[in-house]
Image: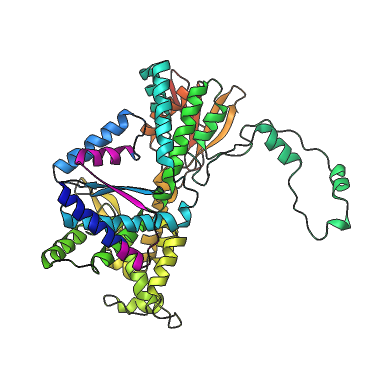
Amino acid sequence: MDRAERAELERWIDIITQKAAELGLDFYPVHFEVVPDHVIYELGSYGLPARFSHWTFGRDYHIQKTMYEYGMAKIYEIVFNTDPCQAFLLESNSMLAHKFVVAHVLGHNDFFKNNVYFEQTDRKMIEKVRLHSNRIRRYEEEYGPLVVEEFLDAVLSIEYHFDIHATAPFHRKTPEEYEQERRHPTRHATEFDDLWNISEERALQPEPAPTRRIPPEPDYDLLGFLRDYAPELERWQRDILSMIREEMLYFVPQMRTKIMNEGWASYWHERILSEIDLTPEEHFEFRRMHSAVLSPSSRMSLNPYYVGYTIFKDIERRWNGEPDPDYPETDWREAPLTRPQGEGLQKIFEVRQLECDTSFLRKYLTEGLVKRLDLYTYKQEEVNGELVWVVQETDWRKVRDTLLDSMTNFGIPVITVEDGDYQRRGELLLRHHYDGKPLDKDYARRTLRYIYQIWKRPVHIQTGPGGEEMISWDGKELIEEPA
């Protein structure tokens, strides 16, 4: 990009930013940088700039780059949830594509700043990730690259197994704190406390027997538990566990709002570009790009841009009191006559602030939308000796509920730590919370080996509809037996 093109882009960034603010978007200052395609795909594979090096990121980079080169996929931009917001534009894009992407980025930025699920986000995470990378590099110099890489392999195999509701900074209760809380539970003061002597009442109660189980109750935070209780870890290894856990917490709000976030950005790139001066040729190209981004889902996947955008547009229509032109027979259930009219824009700003994907779909994925989006459930059946996919369910409520069920815990099996001193031998017992979907046994077997590298003692996982199966790895042999 030469100097004149850069000046033109900067001028349009100012125009689009001003128009977005006029339309009501509230966003952090944005720093845009134009970069070549390999940088875009590197950022996409690493998730954050200056993140630590690992072979899995290189693998993802080559997958994305290959898909781009064969015309199967294209990343137009990368935007990070920081303050100021950092966004990267693809150097090979046309000027119209840059305008399109800038408007899309401002939609994301507004969502990052105002959605309640991002309130606890560390907006300086890029600087923190850079420090993490430097520390890991020092560990590689001190202990050897292969040693650190093998430990990272083990940690990254369970990187999604942490408490998604936790926030940083994180404090895990010690066994002594658990015991103290159990013996003397916190009692909040009431207006009746002067009617009796609380301390005397407690003195009459027998002391409960001490508990030795660690954790005293099932722990959803496998990463945090291993960091705090794995008996033979060195300090640098606990530090790596803590760093990976902290970085994963940064990604949680984005994982919880993927459909909403992309839908919101798509709504606003259309709205903004429709209200700025484009040539007829640019307007045609803009509509072509918009249609490509919002192409309906394939049979086996959902396009979050398309689903989110369509739901936001439908909410706006309904709260404006407008009938559904495609499915008027469903409107009597969706838009009661008592609903205020002309409040569509106010409503979608409210939804953008308060919801995540699961509540968004539960509340606003209506019968008419399920039909318009052509959503259904499917299953494999044998037909003439071949396994084929067939439609299983088209009832809109069942389709919606199945979609919500698939999003529970981001589709990752729910695993809890049940006992860190299983059979009184210091072994680790995990439990898979069966939700109708069986555990991938091959994946579980590989992962148990990785967890063993961290725990250094036998590891077991209990699974099955009634918890009747047990898979164990003792460092030498894989054992599968009834629990």
Instruction: Give above or below for 242 relative to 205.
Output: above
Instruction: Give above or below for 7 relative to 51.
Output: below
Pick whichever, 456 or 433, lies toward us. 456
Left or right of 234, for residue 450: left
Q: Is residue 394 visible?
A: no
> Which residue does the image show at 13% across and 65% down from the upper left?
284
Pick whichever, 129 or 366, lies toward us. 129
Instruction: Give above or below for 274 relative to 203.
Output: below
Question: Is residue 104 covered in magenta?
Answer: no
Residue 20: x and y, percent?
32, 64
Instruction: Give above or below for 144 relative to 96.
Output: above
Residue 5: x and y, percent?
16, 51
Pick whichever, 55 or 277, lies toward us. 277
Question: Is residue 26 covered in magenta?
Answer: yes
> Which residue does the image show at 37% across and 55% down from the upper left?
109
Identify the residue at the far left of this view: 281
Q: How is the image coloured?
A: rainbow
Q: Quadrant of residue 37?
A: top left
Q: Which residues are magenta?
A: 18-46
Residue 228: x and y, percent?
56, 30
